[in-house]
Amino acid sequence: MSRVVLTGGIILIILAVSFSCGCTQEPVTEERKLTETVWMLEKYMDADGSMAETLATAPVTAEFAEDTVGGTSGCNTYNAPYVADGQSLTVGMPIVTMMYCGEPGVMDQESRYLSLLQTAAEYTVSGDLLTITNSAGQEILIFHAVDQNLDGTEWLLTGYNNGAGGFVSVVPGTTVTAAFSEDGQMSGDAGCNSYSGAYTVTGSAISIGPLVMTEMYCASPEGVMAQESAYLAAVQAAASYRVGPGDLTFMDADGKRMAVYERYTPTPQGETWELTGYYNGKGVVSPLANTTITAKFGADGQVTGSVGCNNYFASYAVSETEMTIGPAGSTKMYCASPEGVMEQELRYLNLLGDVATFERAPKTLTLRDAGGSILLTYTVAQPKLTTGEWHMVSYRDAEGKTVSALEGSKVTAVFGTDGQVTGNSGCNTYFGSYTTDKPSISVGPLGLTLMYCETPAGVMEQETGYLAALEAAVTYQLSGEDLTLQTKDGSVSVRFMQAS
């Protein structure tokens, strides 16, 4: 929603209102209380006396605390005093922020809602519905309860408490998620690592943790590791929560915001997926050994990838969790090995055309047919030694010290599938053979061109040290986008990062 702050003498009223939610975990079919529910407006009396439905893009909410009611009025936030006695209800003049929203109907709806709220005379709560009537007994506002049940929900982080007194946005280029399963487990992606742990809910109170996570290190984007630590600390400090229309907020024991999420609507985009299983007519089986099948769903509506022997391409469309793919085309190579690779390829391409729905978690993707049967399963493709170009981050010099790459120099390595390693060593290009039997690696001997470079200062010494460190490697380890080569005593010889 596009929001523009009005100027020209209009004073922006900043609300500092703390609502006592008291949201509960019971199903929405149980009886609600006026003051222990987050209410979202469903219908309101229009100027002609008919009941109009609220705009889907401008939700209106009401949270009744001890003596104030507040929430969002579609564009702005509001806060008003109220008195409830039995079924009678009186609402005073609201204090409202003064932003302007340009979408058609939003400001008219907001004005109408705030006016109607002040004409309230009585209310009734029936199940998950709140109905407010005026002094003539006419229904003027109808709300429904926002379900506070976290079971089976998934969320995308938009902001968190950084532990230093600030509430900050998520680092651009990172995705932080939280999923709540029915068995009391919270899990998600923390930006670099995945995490999981137990959670318990009693009313609006929540307890999370201890959380455990994987132990990868991500060098980019800048700040991702600090964000990860602060986020996990903030989540485990949560003492209460509130589910709003499309958002989730964790608060600590003092009511301070610790984390805010929006509903996670997964799409298949943003990752390169590697096939882990496909339906062969009898059941879901793993791909043939020594074959790699991938899928990358582009923002242009095209899915591309490798199908074991050939590369393929197809159009695709998604709507919520529905998906259609194809028909698929591919290159026309023939591979004799491994045995069955061409049959597997044909089966995979045919299955794409039968896809009707998808399910995405942070690290997995499942494609199903119209009957709900699993056709294809994927996981996020991890970089391989032979995946693209690696950029040197640091190396171990002859004295055993870790030396970072010189600013202004670019040192690269490409490990080809043909057993050849090539790259730029800062000034010259180099080449040689390598062999692997994971985790073992042997590199060299290496040859190189014979240019001399004066800048940046120290580049020739770096070149000599880097190539010596590369040839000294005996093992390697892949972790996310990082590649680490180690010497025989386990020390880091060279550290690379996957080129973007």
Image: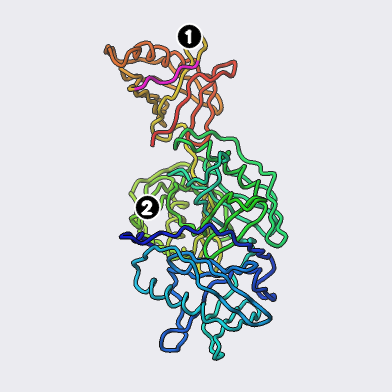
* Mark sitting on residue 298: 2
Residue 302 picture quarter: bottom left
- The image position of residue 461, as x and y in percent, is 37, 10
- In the rendered structure, which segment of residues is drawn in magenta? 402-407
Residue 165 visible here: yes
Report the residue at 42% width, 24% height from top: 392
Please tell me whether mark 2 sits on a helix, a strand or a loop: loop
Q: Identify the image quadrant of the N terminus.
A: bottom left
Foreground of the two, 27 or 391: 27
Could you tell whether 86 is left or right of 110 in the image? right
Report the residue at 55% width, 59% height from top: 17
* Mark sitting on residue 479: none
Foreground of the two, 191 or 43: 43
Could you tell whether 487 is left or right of 220 in the image? right
- Residue at far bottom of view: 136
Residue hosting label 1? 398
